[in-house]
Protein backbone atom coordinates (compact mmCIF):
# COMPACT_ATOMS: atom_id res chain seq x y z
CA UNK A 1 0.00 0.00 0.00
CA UNK A 2 2.84 2.42 0.85
CA UNK A 3 4.72 1.71 -2.40
CA UNK A 4 1.60 2.10 -4.57
CA UNK A 5 1.20 5.80 -3.78
CA UNK A 6 4.70 6.99 -4.89
CA UNK A 7 4.55 4.71 -7.92
CA UNK A 8 1.22 6.15 -9.11
CA UNK A 9 2.55 9.69 -8.54
CA UNK A 10 5.66 8.90 -10.60
CA UNK A 11 3.50 7.53 -13.43
CA UNK A 12 1.43 10.75 -13.44
CA UNK A 13 4.60 12.84 -13.70
CA UNK A 14 5.89 10.66 -16.55
CA UNK A 15 2.59 11.06 -18.44
CA UNK A 16 2.76 14.83 -17.99
CA UNK A 17 6.34 14.95 -19.29
CA UNK A 18 5.39 12.82 -22.29
CA UNK A 19 2.58 15.25 -23.17
CA UNK A 20 4.96 18.18 -22.83
CA UNK A 21 7.50 16.61 -25.23
CA UNK A 22 4.68 15.74 -27.63
CA UNK A 23 3.58 19.36 -27.61
CA UNK A 24 7.20 20.53 -28.14
CA UNK A 25 7.53 18.27 -31.22
CA UNK A 26 4.31 19.64 -32.75
CA UNK A 27 0.83 20.62 -31.65
CA UNK A 28 -0.76 18.03 -33.99
CA UNK A 29 0.39 15.23 -31.66
CA UNK A 30 -2.20 16.41 -29.11
CA UNK A 31 -5.87 15.58 -29.25
CA UNK A 32 -8.40 18.26 -30.16
CA UNK A 33 -9.81 18.16 -26.63
CA UNK A 34 -6.31 18.59 -25.14
CA UNK A 35 -5.66 21.60 -27.38
CA UNK A 36 -8.94 23.31 -26.55
CA UNK A 37 -8.81 22.57 -22.82
CA UNK A 38 -5.14 23.60 -22.56
CA UNK A 39 -5.80 26.96 -24.21
CA UNK A 40 -8.90 27.50 -22.06
CA UNK A 41 -6.92 26.65 -18.90
CA UNK A 42 -4.12 29.06 -19.83
CA UNK A 43 -6.69 31.76 -20.57
CA UNK A 44 -8.28 31.23 -17.14
CA UNK A 45 -4.86 31.46 -15.45
CA UNK A 46 -3.97 34.66 -17.31
CA UNK A 47 -7.39 36.16 -16.45
CA UNK A 48 -6.87 35.31 -12.76
CA UNK A 49 -3.46 36.96 -12.76
CA UNK A 50 -4.99 39.95 -14.54
CA UNK A 51 -7.60 40.37 -11.79
CA UNK A 52 -4.97 40.03 -9.03
CA UNK A 53 -2.66 42.56 -10.68
CA UNK A 54 -5.57 44.99 -11.18
CA UNK A 55 -6.40 44.91 -7.46
CA UNK A 56 -2.71 45.33 -6.59
CA UNK A 57 -2.40 48.31 -8.94
CA UNK A 58 -5.41 50.07 -7.40
CA UNK A 59 -4.05 49.44 -3.88
CA UNK A 60 -0.60 50.79 -4.77
CA UNK A 61 -2.07 53.84 -6.51
CA UNK A 62 -4.28 54.68 -3.49
CA UNK A 63 -1.35 54.36 -1.06
CA UNK A 64 0.87 56.45 -3.32
CA UNK A 65 -1.67 59.27 -3.60
CA UNK A 66 -2.18 59.36 0.16
CA UNK A 67 1.57 59.40 0.95
CA UNK A 68 2.32 62.00 -1.72
CA UNK A 69 -0.57 64.27 -0.69
CA UNK A 70 0.25 64.13 3.05
CA UNK A 71 3.99 64.71 2.53
CA UNK A 72 3.36 67.65 0.18
CA UNK A 73 0.77 69.19 2.51
CA UNK A 74 3.06 68.75 5.53
CA UNK A 75 6.03 70.26 3.70
CA UNK A 76 3.94 73.32 2.76
CA UNK A 77 2.74 73.64 6.38
CA UNK A 78 6.33 73.47 7.71
CA UNK A 79 7.39 76.24 5.35
CA UNK A 80 4.41 78.36 6.34
CA UNK A 81 5.06 77.82 10.09
CA UNK A 82 8.73 78.74 9.67
CA UNK A 83 7.76 81.93 7.87
CA UNK A 84 5.22 82.82 10.58
CA UNK A 85 7.80 82.31 13.35
CA UNK A 86 10.14 84.63 11.51
CA UNK A 87 7.34 87.19 11.07
CA UNK A 88 6.47 87.04 14.79
CA UNK A 89 10.13 87.60 15.70
CA UNK A 90 10.17 90.65 13.41
CA UNK A 91 7.01 92.02 15.05
CA UNK A 92 8.64 91.46 18.45
CA UNK A 93 11.67 93.51 17.37
CA UNK A 94 9.29 96.27 16.31
CA UNK A 95 7.89 96.31 19.84
CA UNK A 96 11.43 96.46 21.30
CA UNK A 97 12.43 99.37 19.11
CA UNK A 98 9.25 101.48 19.57
CA UNK A 99 9.70 104.68 21.50
CA UNK A 100 6.18 104.86 22.94
CA UNK A 101 3.04 102.82 23.28
CA UNK A 102 1.35 104.43 20.29
CA UNK A 103 4.11 103.41 17.92
CA UNK A 104 4.24 99.96 19.50
CA UNK A 105 0.47 99.34 19.02
CA UNK A 106 0.63 98.37 15.33
CA UNK A 107 3.42 95.85 15.98
CA UNK A 108 1.51 94.39 18.94
CA UNK A 109 -1.63 93.94 16.82
CA UNK A 110 0.38 92.26 14.05
CA UNK A 111 2.06 89.94 16.56
CA UNK A 112 -1.30 88.85 18.06
CA UNK A 113 -2.69 88.18 14.57
CA UNK A 114 0.40 86.17 13.62
CA UNK A 115 0.07 84.16 16.85
CA UNK A 116 -3.48 83.09 15.83
CA UNK A 117 -2.33 82.21 12.30
CA UNK A 118 0.57 80.17 13.72
CA UNK A 119 -1.77 78.22 16.01
CA UNK A 120 -4.11 77.44 13.08
CA UNK A 121 -1.17 76.31 10.91
CA UNK A 122 0.04 73.92 13.64
CA UNK A 123 -3.47 72.45 13.94
CA UNK A 124 -3.50 71.86 10.18
CA UNK A 125 -0.11 70.17 10.36
CA UNK A 126 -1.33 67.86 13.16
CA UNK A 127 -4.04 66.51 10.79
CA UNK A 128 -1.33 65.04 8.52
CA UNK A 129 0.46 63.26 11.37
CA UNK A 130 1.43 59.63 10.80
CA UNK A 131 3.19 56.91 12.75
CA UNK A 132 6.60 58.25 11.74
CA UNK A 133 6.13 61.87 12.91
CA UNK A 134 3.53 61.70 15.71
CA UNK A 135 6.02 61.96 18.63
CA UNK A 136 8.10 64.65 16.97
CA UNK A 137 4.97 66.65 16.07
CA UNK A 138 3.60 66.41 19.63
CA UNK A 139 6.83 67.85 21.07
CA UNK A 140 6.85 70.53 18.38
CA UNK A 141 3.24 71.53 19.17
CA UNK A 142 4.09 71.96 22.86
CA UNK A 143 7.01 74.26 22.03
CA UNK A 144 4.84 76.27 19.64
CA UNK A 145 2.30 76.71 22.45
CA UNK A 146 5.09 77.96 24.74
CA UNK A 147 6.31 80.27 21.99
CA UNK A 148 2.81 81.73 21.52
CA UNK A 149 2.27 82.19 25.28
CA UNK A 150 5.64 83.94 25.57
CA UNK A 151 4.78 86.35 22.74
CA UNK A 152 1.32 87.02 24.20
CA UNK A 153 2.94 87.96 27.51
CA UNK A 154 5.39 90.16 25.60
CA UNK A 155 2.49 92.07 24.03
CA UNK A 156 0.72 92.42 27.36
CA UNK A 157 3.81 93.86 29.10
CA UNK A 158 4.51 96.21 26.23
CA UNK A 159 0.97 97.60 26.16
CA UNK A 160 0.37 97.74 29.90
CA UNK A 161 3.87 98.72 31.16
CA UNK A 162 5.99 99.89 28.26
CA UNK A 163 8.55 98.95 25.59
CA UNK A 164 11.32 98.61 28.16
CA UNK A 165 9.37 95.96 30.08
CA UNK A 166 8.68 94.10 26.84
CA UNK A 167 12.33 94.22 25.85
CA UNK A 168 13.38 92.97 29.28
CA UNK A 169 10.92 90.04 29.00
CA UNK A 170 12.08 89.05 25.50
CA UNK A 171 15.83 89.32 26.00
CA UNK A 172 16.58 86.11 27.98
CA UNK A 173 18.15 82.67 27.56
CA UNK A 174 14.83 80.80 27.87
CA UNK A 175 13.53 82.57 24.75
CA UNK A 176 16.67 81.81 22.75
CA UNK A 177 16.68 78.16 23.91
CA UNK A 178 13.04 77.76 22.83
CA UNK A 179 13.85 79.24 19.39
CA UNK A 180 16.76 76.85 18.95
CA UNK A 181 14.58 73.86 19.86
CA UNK A 182 11.91 74.99 17.39
CA UNK A 183 14.52 75.17 14.64
CA UNK A 184 15.70 71.65 15.51
CA UNK A 185 12.07 70.40 15.43
CA UNK A 186 11.47 72.01 12.04
CA UNK A 187 14.58 70.39 10.57
CA UNK A 188 13.60 66.98 11.98
CA UNK A 189 10.07 67.25 10.54
CA UNK A 190 11.45 68.33 7.16
CA UNK A 191 13.64 65.21 7.09
CA UNK A 192 10.64 63.00 7.94
CA UNK A 193 8.52 64.49 5.12
CA UNK A 194 11.36 64.26 2.60
CA UNK A 195 11.71 60.58 3.49
CA UNK A 196 7.96 60.08 3.12
CA UNK A 197 8.06 61.74 -0.33
CA UNK A 198 10.89 59.39 -1.38
CA UNK A 199 8.85 56.39 -0.22
CA UNK A 200 5.91 57.69 -2.29
CA UNK A 201 8.17 57.91 -5.36
CA UNK A 202 9.36 54.33 -4.80
CA UNK A 203 5.74 53.21 -4.53
CA UNK A 204 4.95 55.00 -7.80
CA UNK A 205 7.77 53.10 -9.52
CA UNK A 206 6.33 49.82 -8.24
CA UNK A 207 2.88 50.82 -9.54
CA UNK A 208 4.31 51.49 -13.01
CA UNK A 209 5.77 47.99 -13.10
CA UNK A 210 2.36 46.59 -12.10
CA UNK A 211 0.73 48.54 -14.94
CA UNK A 212 3.26 47.08 -17.39
CA UNK A 213 2.49 43.58 -16.12
CA UNK A 214 -1.23 44.25 -16.61
CA UNK A 215 -0.59 45.29 -20.20
CA UNK A 216 1.44 42.14 -20.93
CA UNK A 217 -1.20 39.91 -19.33
CA UNK A 218 -3.88 41.57 -21.48
CA UNK A 219 -1.81 40.85 -24.61
CA UNK A 220 -1.36 37.22 -23.48
CA UNK A 221 -5.11 36.79 -22.98
CA UNK A 222 -5.80 38.32 -26.41
CA UNK A 223 -3.22 35.99 -27.99
CA UNK A 224 -4.75 32.90 -26.34
CA UNK A 225 -8.25 33.84 -27.51
CA UNK A 226 -6.98 34.20 -31.09
CA UNK A 227 -5.04 30.95 -30.80
CA UNK A 228 -8.23 29.13 -29.79
CA UNK A 229 -9.99 30.36 -32.95
CA UNK A 230 -7.04 29.32 -35.14
CA UNK A 231 -6.90 25.84 -33.54
CA UNK A 232 -10.61 25.30 -34.10
CA UNK A 233 -10.44 26.37 -37.73
CA UNK A 234 -7.31 24.45 -38.67
CA UNK A 235 -7.62 21.39 -36.46
CA UNK A 236 -11.35 20.69 -36.58
CA UNK A 237 -13.50 22.50 -39.14
CA UNK A 238 -11.16 22.38 -42.14
CA UNK A 239 -10.10 18.79 -41.45
CA UNK A 240 -13.72 17.62 -41.11
CA UNK A 241 -14.63 19.26 -44.43
CA UNK A 242 -11.76 17.45 -46.20
CA UNK A 243 -12.71 14.09 -44.64
CA UNK A 244 -16.34 14.71 -45.59
CA UNK A 245 -15.39 15.31 -49.22
CA UNK A 246 -13.33 12.11 -49.19
CA UNK A 247 -16.35 10.21 -47.81
CA UNK A 248 -18.55 11.60 -50.61
CA UNK A 249 -16.04 10.45 -53.23
CA UNK A 250 -15.98 6.97 -51.73
CA UNK A 251 -19.79 6.88 -51.70
CA UNK A 252 -19.79 7.84 -55.40
CA UNK A 253 -17.54 4.85 -56.17
CA UNK A 254 -14.07 6.44 -56.16
CA UNK A 255 -12.41 3.83 -53.94
CA UNK A 256 -8.89 4.88 -55.00
CA UNK A 257 -9.06 8.40 -53.60
CA UNK A 258 -6.73 9.28 -50.74
CA UNK A 259 -8.09 9.92 -47.23
CA UNK A 260 -6.48 13.03 -45.67
CA UNK A 261 -5.11 13.42 -42.11
CA UNK A 262 -4.23 9.75 -41.56
CA UNK A 263 -1.03 10.70 -39.76
CA UNK A 264 -2.74 12.72 -37.00
CA UNK A 265 -2.91 11.27 -33.47
CA UNK A 266 -6.07 13.00 -32.28
CA UNK A 267 -9.80 12.43 -32.85
CA UNK A 268 -9.52 13.68 -36.43
CA UNK A 269 -6.88 11.04 -37.11
CA UNK A 270 -9.12 8.32 -35.65
CA UNK A 271 -11.95 9.54 -37.88
CA UNK A 272 -9.67 9.55 -40.97
CA UNK A 273 -8.50 5.99 -40.30
CA UNK A 274 -12.10 4.84 -39.85
CA UNK A 275 -12.95 6.37 -43.27
CA UNK A 276 -9.94 4.59 -44.77
CA UNK A 277 -11.18 1.26 -43.41
CA UNK A 278 -14.58 2.11 -44.83
CA UNK A 279 -12.97 2.82 -48.23
CA UNK A 280 -11.05 -0.47 -48.19
CA UNK A 281 -14.22 -2.39 -47.34
CA UNK A 282 -16.15 -0.71 -50.18
CA UNK A 283 -13.28 -1.41 -52.59
CA UNK A 284 -13.30 -5.07 -51.63
CA UNK A 285 -17.08 -5.25 -52.11
CA UNK A 286 -16.71 -3.76 -55.58
CA UNK A 287 -14.05 -6.31 -56.42
CA UNK A 288 -16.31 -9.15 -55.34
CA UNK A 289 -19.21 -7.78 -57.34
CA UNK A 290 -17.02 -7.64 -60.47
CA UNK A 291 -16.16 -11.30 -60.22
CA UNK A 292 -18.20 -13.49 -62.47
CA UNK A 293 -18.26 -17.00 -61.09
CA UNK A 294 -18.92 -19.76 -63.59
CA UNK A 295 -20.53 -22.17 -61.20
CA UNK A 296 -23.11 -22.00 -58.43
CA UNK A 297 -20.53 -23.10 -55.89
CA UNK A 298 -18.26 -20.25 -56.96
CA UNK A 299 -21.18 -17.80 -56.76
CA UNK A 300 -22.12 -19.10 -53.32
CA UNK A 301 -18.54 -18.73 -52.16
CA UNK A 302 -18.45 -15.19 -53.55
CA UNK A 303 -21.73 -14.34 -51.81
CA UNK A 304 -20.35 -15.71 -48.54
CA UNK A 305 -17.22 -13.63 -48.91
CA UNK A 306 -19.28 -10.57 -49.74
CA UNK A 307 -21.40 -11.10 -46.62
CA UNK A 308 -18.23 -11.20 -44.55
CA UNK A 309 -17.09 -7.94 -46.01
CA UNK A 310 -20.54 -6.49 -45.52
CA UNK A 311 -20.18 -7.37 -41.85
CA UNK A 312 -16.79 -5.67 -41.79
CA UNK A 313 -18.32 -2.71 -43.60
CA UNK A 314 -20.95 -2.39 -40.87
CA UNK A 315 -18.23 -2.68 -38.22
CA UNK A 316 -16.23 0.13 -39.85
CA UNK A 317 -19.40 2.15 -40.11
CA UNK A 318 -19.85 1.80 -36.36
CA UNK A 319 -16.21 2.79 -35.89
CA UNK A 320 -16.87 5.92 -37.95
CA UNK A 321 -19.90 6.69 -35.79
CA UNK A 322 -17.85 6.17 -32.62
CA UNK A 323 -15.15 8.53 -33.91
CA UNK A 324 -17.73 11.22 -34.66
CA UNK A 325 -19.28 10.80 -31.21
CA UNK A 326 -15.86 11.16 -29.54
CA UNK A 327 -15.52 14.73 -30.81
CA UNK A 328 -15.85 17.40 -28.08
CA UNK A 329 -17.99 19.53 -30.44
CA UNK A 330 -21.46 18.88 -31.78
CA UNK A 331 -21.58 17.59 -35.38
CA UNK A 332 -24.49 17.28 -37.83
CA UNK A 333 -24.40 16.39 -41.51
CA UNK A 334 -27.29 17.32 -43.85
CA UNK A 335 -28.00 16.34 -47.43
CA UNK A 336 -29.07 18.78 -50.14
CA UNK A 337 -32.67 18.78 -48.83
CA UNK A 338 -31.71 19.54 -45.21
CA UNK A 339 -32.31 15.94 -44.09
CA UNK A 340 -30.05 14.52 -41.39
CA UNK A 341 -27.28 12.23 -42.68
CA UNK A 342 -25.45 11.86 -39.33
CA UNK A 343 -25.16 13.55 -35.95
CA UNK A 344 -23.12 12.86 -32.83
CA UNK A 345 -24.02 12.68 -29.15
CA UNK A 346 -22.64 16.14 -28.35
CA UNK A 347 -25.04 17.71 -30.86
CA UNK A 348 -27.92 15.90 -29.15
CA UNK A 349 -26.69 17.13 -25.76
CA UNK A 350 -26.49 20.78 -26.89
CA UNK A 351 -30.14 20.81 -28.01
CA UNK A 352 -31.53 18.05 -25.71
CA UNK A 353 -32.71 15.96 -28.69
CA UNK A 354 -34.53 12.65 -28.04
CA UNK A 355 -33.40 9.30 -29.46
CA UNK A 356 -36.35 9.36 -31.84
CA UNK A 357 -34.50 11.89 -34.00
CA UNK A 358 -32.02 9.82 -36.02
CA UNK A 359 -30.34 9.84 -39.43
CA UNK A 360 -33.15 10.40 -41.96
CA UNK A 361 -34.98 12.93 -39.77
CA UNK A 362 -35.41 16.43 -41.12
CA UNK A 363 -34.03 19.70 -39.83
CA UNK A 364 -37.61 20.88 -39.40
CA UNK A 365 -38.27 18.04 -36.91
CA UNK A 366 -35.22 19.09 -34.90
CA UNK A 367 -36.40 22.70 -34.81
CA UNK A 368 -39.93 21.66 -33.77
CA UNK A 369 -38.46 19.77 -30.82
CA UNK A 370 -36.37 22.82 -29.89
CA UNK A 371 -39.50 24.96 -29.96
CA UNK A 372 -41.21 22.55 -27.50
CA UNK A 373 -38.17 22.51 -25.19
CA UNK A 374 -37.89 26.31 -25.21
CA UNK A 375 -34.53 26.49 -27.05
CA UNK A 376 -35.90 28.07 -30.26
CA UNK A 377 -38.43 30.87 -30.68
CA UNK A 378 -37.99 31.86 -34.33
CA UNK A 379 -39.94 30.98 -37.48
CA UNK A 380 -39.17 27.32 -38.28
CA UNK A 381 -40.10 27.57 -41.97
CA UNK A 382 -37.94 30.67 -42.55
CA UNK A 383 -34.99 29.14 -40.69
CA UNK A 384 -35.12 25.90 -42.76
CA UNK A 385 -35.41 27.98 -45.94
CA UNK A 386 -32.31 29.98 -44.98
CA UNK A 387 -30.33 26.76 -44.36
CA UNK A 388 -31.38 25.37 -47.74
CA UNK A 389 -30.29 28.61 -49.40
CA UNK A 390 -26.85 28.32 -47.79
CA UNK A 391 -26.60 24.68 -48.91
CA UNK A 392 -27.50 25.69 -52.45
CA UNK A 393 -24.95 28.54 -52.51
CA UNK A 394 -22.25 26.22 -51.06
CA UNK A 395 -20.61 29.08 -49.20
CA UNK A 396 -18.86 28.23 -45.91
CA UNK A 397 -19.84 30.41 -42.96
CA UNK A 398 -19.25 30.84 -39.23
CA UNK A 399 -21.54 32.61 -36.78
CA UNK A 400 -22.83 32.53 -33.20
CA UNK A 401 -26.34 32.13 -31.82
CA UNK A 402 -27.71 32.66 -28.32
CA UNK A 403 -30.19 30.08 -27.07
CA UNK A 404 -33.16 31.01 -24.91
CA UNK A 405 -31.45 29.51 -21.84
CA UNK A 406 -28.52 31.96 -22.23
CA UNK A 407 -25.98 29.58 -23.78
CA UNK A 408 -23.87 30.87 -26.70
CA UNK A 409 -23.22 28.39 -29.54
CA UNK A 410 -20.43 28.92 -32.11
CA UNK A 411 -21.36 27.33 -35.48
CA UNK A 412 -19.00 26.50 -38.38
CA UNK A 413 -20.69 25.37 -41.62
CA UNK A 414 -18.96 23.88 -44.67
CA UNK A 415 -20.36 22.35 -47.92
CA UNK A 416 -19.82 18.66 -48.78
CA UNK A 417 -19.24 17.19 -52.22
CA UNK A 418 -22.50 15.95 -53.62
CA UNK A 419 -24.63 18.79 -52.26
CA UNK A 420 -24.49 18.00 -48.56
CA UNK A 421 -23.64 20.19 -45.60
CA UNK A 422 -21.62 19.67 -42.40
CA UNK A 423 -21.99 21.85 -39.31
CA UNK A 424 -19.69 21.80 -36.27
CA UNK A 425 -21.20 23.48 -33.19
CA UNK A 426 -19.52 24.35 -29.92
CA UNK A 427 -20.80 25.76 -26.61
CA UNK A 428 -18.62 28.90 -26.09
CA UNK A 429 -20.62 30.43 -23.23
CA UNK A 430 -17.77 30.30 -20.69
CA UNK A 431 -15.27 31.62 -23.25
CA UNK A 432 -17.45 34.65 -24.04
CA UNK A 433 -17.95 35.31 -20.33
CA UNK A 434 -14.17 35.35 -19.86
CA UNK A 435 -13.81 37.69 -22.83
CA UNK A 436 -16.35 40.09 -21.30
CA UNK A 437 -14.43 40.02 -18.01
CA UNK A 438 -11.23 40.79 -19.93
CA UNK A 439 -12.92 43.71 -21.72
CA UNK A 440 -14.09 45.13 -18.39
CA UNK A 441 -10.56 44.83 -17.02
CA UNK A 442 -9.16 46.63 -20.09
CA UNK A 443 -11.67 49.47 -19.64
CA UNK A 444 -10.79 49.61 -15.94
CA UNK A 445 -7.07 49.83 -16.77
CA UNK A 446 -7.73 52.57 -19.36
CA UNK A 447 -9.66 54.57 -16.73
CA UNK A 448 -6.73 54.34 -14.31
CA UNK A 449 -4.21 55.47 -16.96
CA UNK A 450 -6.43 58.39 -17.98
CA UNK A 451 -6.72 59.65 -14.38
CA UNK A 452 -3.15 59.40 -13.07
CA UNK A 453 -1.45 62.74 -12.34
CA UNK A 454 1.67 61.83 -14.32
CA UNK A 455 1.71 62.31 -18.10
CA UNK A 456 1.93 59.02 -20.06
CA UNK A 457 3.05 59.15 -23.72
CA UNK A 458 3.48 56.18 -26.10
CA UNK A 459 5.47 56.35 -29.37
CA UNK A 460 5.96 53.97 -32.28
CA UNK A 461 9.66 53.08 -32.02
CA UNK A 462 9.93 52.60 -35.78
CA UNK A 463 9.01 56.16 -36.85
CA UNK A 464 8.92 58.05 -33.46
CA UNK A 465 5.29 59.09 -34.02
CA UNK A 466 2.97 59.60 -31.06
CA UNK A 467 0.38 56.80 -30.76
CA UNK A 468 -1.11 57.57 -27.31
CA UNK A 469 -1.23 60.37 -24.71
CA UNK A 470 -3.29 60.46 -21.54
CA UNK A 471 -5.22 63.40 -20.15
CA UNK A 472 -2.32 64.61 -17.96
CA UNK A 473 0.03 64.56 -20.97
CA UNK A 474 -2.42 66.67 -23.01
CA UNK A 475 -2.41 69.26 -20.24
CA UNK A 476 1.40 69.29 -20.00
CA UNK A 477 1.91 69.65 -23.78
CA UNK A 478 -0.92 72.16 -24.07
CA UNK A 479 -2.51 70.44 -27.07
CA UNK A 480 -5.45 68.10 -27.61
CA UNK A 481 -5.01 64.41 -28.27
CA UNK A 482 -6.21 64.83 -31.86
CA UNK A 483 -3.45 67.40 -32.49
CA UNK A 484 -0.73 65.09 -31.09
CA UNK A 485 -1.53 61.51 -32.25
CA UNK A 486 0.23 60.48 -35.48
CA UNK A 487 2.76 63.31 -35.44
CA UNK A 488 6.46 63.49 -34.58
CA UNK A 489 8.18 65.86 -32.15
CA UNK A 490 9.41 68.01 -35.06
CA UNK A 491 5.79 68.62 -36.11
CA UNK A 492 4.80 69.81 -32.60
CA UNK A 493 7.82 71.53 -31.02
CA UNK A 494 10.57 73.91 -32.04
CA UNK A 495 13.64 72.55 -33.84
CA UNK A 496 15.82 72.66 -30.69
CA UNK A 497 13.16 71.05 -28.48
CA UNK A 498 12.41 68.36 -31.10
CA UNK A 499 16.13 67.58 -31.48
CA UNK A 500 16.45 67.13 -27.70
CA UNK A 501 13.37 64.89 -27.54
CA UNK A 502 14.60 62.72 -30.43
CA UNK A 503 18.03 62.48 -28.79
CA UNK A 504 16.44 61.10 -25.60
CA UNK A 505 14.36 58.68 -27.68
CA UNK A 506 17.47 57.34 -29.45
CA UNK A 507 19.20 56.93 -26.09
CA UNK A 508 16.28 54.78 -24.92
CA UNK A 509 16.42 52.62 -28.07
CA UNK A 510 20.12 52.03 -27.42
CA UNK A 511 19.84 51.12 -23.72
CA UNK A 512 16.36 49.45 -23.72
CA UNK A 513 15.01 51.41 -20.70
CA UNK A 514 15.49 54.54 -18.58
CA UNK A 515 14.47 53.84 -14.99
CA UNK A 516 16.16 56.97 -13.59
CA UNK A 517 14.41 60.28 -14.43
CA UNK A 518 16.08 62.67 -16.88
CA UNK A 519 15.33 66.37 -16.31
CA UNK A 520 15.32 68.64 -19.40
CA UNK A 521 14.17 72.16 -20.26
CA UNK A 522 11.81 72.22 -23.26
CA UNK A 523 10.43 75.18 -25.19
CA UNK A 524 6.74 74.32 -25.40
CA UNK A 525 4.95 76.27 -28.20
CA UNK A 526 1.73 76.31 -26.16
CA UNK A 527 3.00 76.73 -22.57
CA UNK A 528 6.41 78.33 -22.97
CA UNK A 529 9.66 77.17 -21.40
CA UNK A 530 8.99 74.14 -19.17
CA UNK A 531 11.20 71.95 -16.94
CA UNK A 532 10.20 68.28 -17.30
CA UNK A 533 11.32 65.01 -15.70
CA UNK A 534 10.91 61.92 -17.90
CA UNK A 535 11.30 58.16 -17.53
CA UNK A 536 11.11 55.88 -20.58
CA UNK A 537 10.44 52.16 -20.94
CA UNK A 538 10.81 50.21 -24.20
CA UNK A 539 8.23 47.59 -25.20
CA UNK A 540 8.91 44.94 -27.84
CA UNK A 541 11.95 44.69 -30.09
CA UNK A 542 13.21 45.95 -33.43
CA UNK A 543 11.30 44.52 -36.37
CA UNK A 544 8.15 43.82 -34.33
CA UNK A 545 4.92 45.56 -35.25
CA UNK A 546 4.25 46.27 -31.57
CA UNK A 547 7.69 47.85 -30.97
CA UNK A 548 7.09 51.06 -29.03
CA UNK A 549 8.19 52.85 -25.89
CA UNK A 550 6.30 54.60 -23.11
CA UNK A 551 7.40 57.87 -21.50
CA UNK A 552 6.23 58.96 -18.01
CA UNK A 553 6.48 62.77 -17.83
CA UNK A 554 6.29 65.11 -14.81
CA UNK A 555 6.21 68.91 -15.19
CA UNK A 556 8.55 70.33 -12.54
CA UNK A 557 8.46 73.97 -13.68
CA UNK A 558 6.36 75.19 -10.77
CA UNK A 559 8.49 73.21 -8.29
CA UNK A 560 11.70 74.71 -9.69
CA UNK A 561 10.26 78.23 -9.57
CA UNK A 562 9.12 77.75 -5.97
CA UNK A 563 12.54 76.39 -4.99
CA UNK A 564 14.25 79.36 -6.60
Image (spheres, helix red, strand yellow):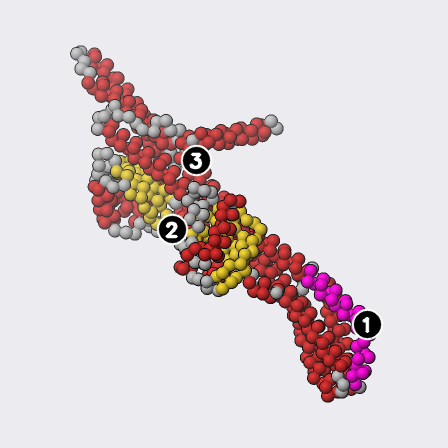
In the rendered image, which residue does mark 2 sit on?
406
Image location of residue 136, percent across then percent down: 73, 63
Q: For mark 3, does the 10 Å Cα neighbourhood hold few (<14), some (14 to 19), or many (20 or more) residues?
A: some
Q: For mark 1, does the 10 Å Cα neighbourhood hold few (<14), some (14 to 19), or many (20 or more) residues?
A: few
Which mark is drawn over residue 34? 3
Confirm whether residue 372 shows in the render. no
Looking at the rendered image, the disc whose residue lies closer to the viewer, 3 or 2, is: 3
Task: Identify which residue, 317 or 17, lies in the foreground.
Answer: 17
Q: For mark 2, does the 10 Å Cα neighbourhood hold few (<14), some (14 to 19), or many (20 or more) residues?
A: few
Q: Earlier in the sequence, mark 1 or mark 3?
A: 3
- Magenta span: 162-191
Q: At 81% across and 76% down in the image, what residue appears?
A: 171
Image location of residue 440, percent across then percent down: 45, 54
Q: At 45% across and 32% down in the image, what residue appears?
A: 23
Q: Earlier in the sequence, mark 3 or mark 2?
A: 3
Kind of element beneath mark 1: helix
Q: At 42% across and 31% down in the image, what residue appears?
A: 26
Indicate yes or no whether the magenta region holds residue 258.
no
Looking at the rendered image, the disc whose residue lies closer to the viewer, 1 or 3, is: 1
Image quarter (top left, top right, bottom left or bottom right) of the C terminus: bottom right
Q: Is residue 487 above or below residue 7?
A: below
Image quarter (top left, top right, bottom left or bottom right) of the N terminus: top right
Task: Identify which residue, 80 or 502, lies in the foreground.
Answer: 502
Indicate yes or no whether the magenta region holds residue 171.
yes
Confirm whether residue 402 shows in the render. yes
Q: Is residue 145 left or right of residue 435?
A: right
Q: What's the distance in space between the residues labelled 3 and 2, CA to CA? A: 26 Å
Q: Is residue 323 left or right of residue 58?
A: left
Which mark is drawn over residue 174? 1
Q: What's the distance in space between the residues labelled 1 and 3, CA to CA? A: 84 Å
Amino acid sequence: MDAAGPQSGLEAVIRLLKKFFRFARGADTLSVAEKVYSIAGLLAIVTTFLLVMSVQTVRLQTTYRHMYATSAEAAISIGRINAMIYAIVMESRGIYMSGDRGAMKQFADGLVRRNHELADAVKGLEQTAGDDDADQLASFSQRIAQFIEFRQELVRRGLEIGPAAAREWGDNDANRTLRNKLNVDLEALERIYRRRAREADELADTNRYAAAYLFMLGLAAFYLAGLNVVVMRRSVVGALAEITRATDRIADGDVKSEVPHLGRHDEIGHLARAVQHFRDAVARIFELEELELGTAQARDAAMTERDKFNDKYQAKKWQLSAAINSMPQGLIMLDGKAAVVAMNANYRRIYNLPETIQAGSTLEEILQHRVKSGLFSGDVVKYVGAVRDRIAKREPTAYEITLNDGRIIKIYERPMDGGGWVSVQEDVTEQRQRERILERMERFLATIIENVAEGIIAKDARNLRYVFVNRAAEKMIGMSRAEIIGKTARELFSADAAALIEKRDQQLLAQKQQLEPIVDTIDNPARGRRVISARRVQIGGAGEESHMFVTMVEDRTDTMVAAA
